[in-house]
Every structure is written in C-alpha cells, then in structure tokens.
Image (tube, rainbow, N blue to C red):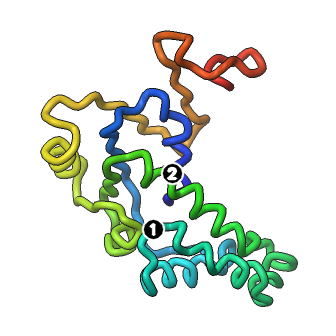
Amino acid sequence: MMQALSAQVIRHRRIMSDRCVFIVSSICDGYFHDERWPYLRELYDLFQHDYMNILPDMNRYGEYFATKEEYIRKYRFANAFHPFHGFSMMSCGHLAEEHTSAIYIVGAREPGIARGMGLKTRATFEEALADAMRKYTGPNPNILALPRTFTTAAVHLCMKDPALNSAPVGGAPCGG
C-alpha cells in the first residue's frame, strides 16, 4: 500500500504543497496475498518490533530475506515475487512518509494494519478531511480528487509555468 501511495507522490510532487495530505480509501483487511508475496507478512511483523521506527530501519534484514530458501523456492517455482522485492517496496514506500504531512486511510476493516505503517485512520472522508484541515492544511485546502486512481491510466499533472515541469520525453509533456 505504501508503495502505491509513493507512486502518487512521485507523479504529483511538482504540484504538491509542503503540507500535502493524502486521503485514500482502502479496505485494508489484512490480506497479504501470501502466494504472490510470501515474505510480506513476516516483513510487516518485523517492522512492528525491535526498534523499527521508519522503513529504512528494516534494511539490516535485506540479505536474510533475499536468501531465505523457502521464499527463493516460491519465487523460482510458484510465481511469487523475489523476497528482496519487499525491500524495494519499502524503500519506495518511505517516499510517501517523507513528502506528506499525513496520510489518512478511510474505510479500513483492520485499521491497526494501516496504523502499523504510520498511517492515520478514519471511518469517513468527511472525518479525515476535517482532521486534516484542523491539523495540517488550514480551513481552505486545495483539493485534488483522483477517484479513478489505480483503475485506469495514471494522471500526470503539469505546472502552469512550463519551466517548472520536467523536460518532455517522447513528445509527452512533464517528462512523459
């Protein structure tokens, strides 16, 4: 989930406020998809203990996971992701924490899982927005709503002043 949120940070960083807040709906029900990511549950559980305060604190376990025979076999023969992929997801996920004031998850069935990743949880968008305005954005936030995120092609936004955008790539503005 954090990697997906960070993908939005990467896409929209050029237009985001320094006090940016994400409000995102997620069922967040504890389904780790053990067949695809067999290492993820163990990785998440480790993050909850032993002085793991931020995602980079987990780096010391990279080689342990990358060489764990059970996970390697599932990667080679059962279409699972390589166990080091979890660390790639975590390092990318750290970008969301670094470049937002807060991230709210709305509608989580197991809110403790979201809180265990440093996210705030609320039952409704209205509650999340009210809390964000009180604590981070002030009473008149600029709101970018992207209801089709992760269901269609990604939106890449440009600044009004083209000099503030990335160089065009392949004829596409804002770096493609």
Q: Is residue 163 above or below residue 143?
A: above
- 86 relative position to 110: left or right: right
- Residue 83 position, x and y percent, is 72, 75
Q: Which mark is residue 147?
A: none
Q: Are there few (<14), some (14-19), or many (20+) residues within 10 Å of tag 2?
A: some
Q: Residue at x 66, y 74 (%)?
A: 37
Examine the image and state in which quarter residue 35 appears. Answer: bottom right
Please tell me whether mark 2 sits on a helix, a strand or a loop: helix
Q: Earlier in the sequence, mark 2 or mark 1?
A: 1
Which one is in front, 149 or 6?
A: 6
Please tell me whether mark 1 sits on a helix, a strand or a loop: loop
- Residue 19 position, x and y percent, is 30, 39
Q: Is residue 164 above or below residue 79?
A: above
Q: Residue at x 43, y 81 (%)?
A: 51
- Residue 5 position, x and y percent, is 48, 50
Which one is in front, 176 or 32?
A: 176
Tell me the amino acid under the disc marked 1.
Ile
Tell me the amino acid under the disc marked 2.
Leu
Q: Residue at x 22, y 53 (%)?
A: 124
Q: CA distance from mark 2 to mark 1?
A: 11 Å
Q: Quadrant of the C terminus?
A: top right
Q: Is residue 137 above or below residue 1?
A: above
The answer to the question of whether label 2 and label 1 lie on touching residues, with beta carbons closer than 8 A, is: no
Residue under label 2: 95
Residue under label 1: 54
